[in-house]
Image (cartoon, rainbow, N blue to C red):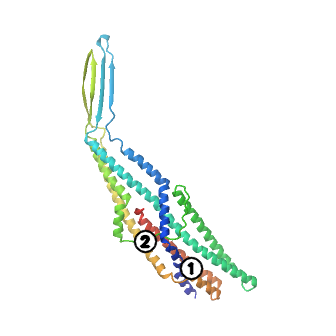
């Protein structure tokens, strides 16, 4: 009888959750609304937006020629009859002409990279928020089940106490029900505390603006494709990968700029000189020979280019196997959740146990033991369901 009851208890593990899953559309809308609010109010996202706006302005500096230079000299002659000398020179320095186009190209590539970095940071925040929402859905669902168990146990405690008062019951049944109720209340309070903490975390992510996520149904899942298709889609849209690929482009542009800066600089301008009552004026031309100032800069940029390529290669390798591991994990969890769903949606084992206890077919100890088995199995199912949805959320992070 105990084995039968335990097996039947597993049959209902999913049934209590099917109703919650029927309102999927509303849950998805609520989740999307929550993420939209956080995207608008999150301090980290807002700070990153401001930071990269500043960086974009920074990348646009240094693209113009140097400031003009003005020199004026007045020299008194000695002895007095030697006369005085006046020199006036205004010059404009230029880098080698091709360097300006290369600097402009580098600036554009750096600005483009800023968008990838901003998008990657935003996705990190929104994924964190989405995972918290999934945790809340789990605790909200489990809290509903704990509440049902609490109400059911309170009913039996009342019945046992009434029988004891009439002389038909026994104190053992009353004490057993009280002990079960204490454990259930402890679980209820623990879940309540977790729900409060997670909602506080959401409020924190929402920039301190109060937000409460009370849903108990998971969002609709995307249609899972093959690993190769999914990995290829992630690869083309992953902002971190795009950031690192752009870093390679920037590295090559910086190398071009460094090579251009090794070429001679040009000074042109106007020179006026007056001495002994005579004046001279004309064109000033000068060259700066790059012998020492930029020494080894090209080698440094070449080394950085190699580093960037290796860094990208590391990310590709890590990202591929991380995606593969998550894909395998979700596949295994999908099988587990599907098996639960296929087996446990046709009967109500709580009613079966209640009827068996009411008819005296099982003892109070057996009843509460089987109920413990049932709720332990239910909790295992809810945990598997939660982990399944969290893994899917991580795989589809690139869509946030």
> In the figure, is residue 20 to the left or right of 244?
right
What numbered label is drawn on residue 158? none
Q: Position of residue 291 (x, y in %)?
A: 27, 37
Q: Spatial distance from mark 1 to mark 2, Cα to Cα?
A: 25 Å
Q: Mark 1, residues whose alpha carbon is within 10 Å: few (<14), some, or many (≥20)?
A: many
Q: Residue at x 50, y 68 (%)?
A: 27
Q: Residue at x 40, y 54 (%)?
A: 117
Q: Residue at x 35, y 49 (%)?
A: 110
The mark that comes first in sequence, 1 or 2, is 2
Q: Mark 2, residues whose alpha carbon is within 10 Å: few (<14), some, or many (≥20)?
A: many
CB under 8 Å between discs 1 and 2: no
Q: Is residue 271 above or below residue 387?
A: above
Q: Is residue 199 above or below residue 358?
A: above
Q: Position of residue 119 (x, y in %)?
A: 41, 56
Q: Position of residue 9 (x, y in %)?
A: 55, 82
Instruction: Choose top left, top right, bottom left or bottom right for residue 314.
Output: bottom left
> In the figure, is residue 135 to the left or right of 275?
right
Q: Is residue 297 above or below residue 82?
A: below
Q: Is residue 255 above or below residue 288?
A: below
- Answer whether residue 8 is visible to the viewer in this image: yes
Determine the secondary structure under disc 1.
helix
Q: Quadrant of the N terminus?
A: bottom right
Task: Return the residue at label 1.
Answer: 374
Determine the secondary structure under disc 2.
helix
> In the figure, is residue 186 to the left or right of 88?
right
Task: Return the residue at label 2.
Answer: 330
Q: Quadrant of the C terminus?
A: bottom left
């Amino acid at each position: 009888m105990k084995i039968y009851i335990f097996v039947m208890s597993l049959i209902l593990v999913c049934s209590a959750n099917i109703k919650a899953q029927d309102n999927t559309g509303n849950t998805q809308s609520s989740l999307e609304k929550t993420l939209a609010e956080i995207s608008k109010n999150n301090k980290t996202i807002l700070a990153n937006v401001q930071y990269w706006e500043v960086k974009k302005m920074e990348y646009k500096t240094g693209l113009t020629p140097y400031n003009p230079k003005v020199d004026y000299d007045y020299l008194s002659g000695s002895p007095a009859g030697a006369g005085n000398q006046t020199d006036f020179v205004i010059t404009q320095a230029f880098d080698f002409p091709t360097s300006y186009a290369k600097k402009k190209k580098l600036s554009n590539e750096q600005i483009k990279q800023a968008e990838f970095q901003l998008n990657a940071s935003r996705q990190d925040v929104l994924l964190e928020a989405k995972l918290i929402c999934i945790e809340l859905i789990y605790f909200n669902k489990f809290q509903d089940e704990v509440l049902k168990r609490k109400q059911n146990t309170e009913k039996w405690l009342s019945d046992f106490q009434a029988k004891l008062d009439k002389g038909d019951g026994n104190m053992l049944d009353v004490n057993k029900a009280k002990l079960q109720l204490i454990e259930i209340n402890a679980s209820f309070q623990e879940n309540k505390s977790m729900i409060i903490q997670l909602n506080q975390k959401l409020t924190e992510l929402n920039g301190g603006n109060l937000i409460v996520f009370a849903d108990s149904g998971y969002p609709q899942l995307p249609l899972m494709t093959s690993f190769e298709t999914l990995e290829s889609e992630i690869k083309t849209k992953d902002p971190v990968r795009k950031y690192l690929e752009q870093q390679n482009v920037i590295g090559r542009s910086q190398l071009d700029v460094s090579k251009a800066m090794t070429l001679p600089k040009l000074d042109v301008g106007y020179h006026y000189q007056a001495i002994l009552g005579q004046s001279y004026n004309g064109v000033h031309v000068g060259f700066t020979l790059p012998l020492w100032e930029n020494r080894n800069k090209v080698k440094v940029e070449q080394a950085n280019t190699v580093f960037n390529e290796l860094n990208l290669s590391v990310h590709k390798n890590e990202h591929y196997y991380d995606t593969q591991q998550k894909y395998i994990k979700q596949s295994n969890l999908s099988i587990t959740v599907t098996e639960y769903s296929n087996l446990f949606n046709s009967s109500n084992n709580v009613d079966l146990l209640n009827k068996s206890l009411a008819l005296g077919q099982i003892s109070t100890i057996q009843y509460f033991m089987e109920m413990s088995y049932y709720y332990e199995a239910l909790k295992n199912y809810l945990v598997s369901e939660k982990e399944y949805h969290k893994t899917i959320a991580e795989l589809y992070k690139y869509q946030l």
